[in-house]
Image: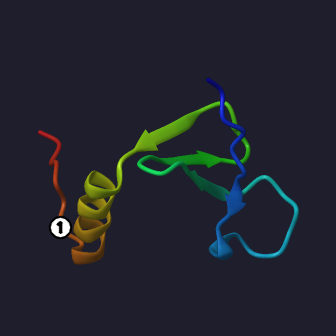
Amino acid sequence: MNIALTWQKSSFSGGSDGNNCLELTATPTILHLRESDTPTTILTITPTPLAHLLAGIRKDTPTHQSP
């Protein structure tokens, strides 16, 4: 079954119609993220791991260090 997704542009993307935007849509249990200049590449994630990622970014704590 295919569900039509309605994408919403991030408020941080400004008011332009350019292709420098983060877009988001959601189904009941999954979030979908994409960059508007590559709309066929979609990151699909559930809310809990995304919340952990955002919390780590906010704390500015790297979760992975290069050798």
Q: Residue at x 39, y 44 (%)?
A: 45
Q: Residue at x 22, y 76 (%)?
A: 59
Badge 1 crowding class, 10 Å Cα cut-off, few under 14, some 14 to 19, many 20 or more, is few
Q: Quadrant of the C terminus?
A: top left
Residue at the left extreme?
67
The local secondary structure at tag 1 comes to loop
- The residue identified by callout 1 is 61
Residue at the right extreme?
17
Percent position of residue 5, x then y: 69, 44
Q: Which of the pair 63/8 is nearer the observer?
A: 8
Whether 27 is drawn above or below 8: the answer is above
Residue at the top extreme?
1
Percent position of residue 58, x then y: 29, 75
Percent position of residue 29, x then y: 41, 49
Q: Quadrant of residue 13?
A: bottom right
Q: Amino acid at mark 1?
A: Thr
Whether 3 is drawn above or below 45: the answer is above
Left or right: where does residue 37 sit relative to residue 27?
A: right
Percent position of residue 21, x then y: 69, 58
Left or right: where does residue 28 sit relative to residue 51?
A: right
Q: How many numbered marks have been drawn onto this rendered protein structure?
A: 1
Q: Residue at x 60, y 56 (%)?
A: 24
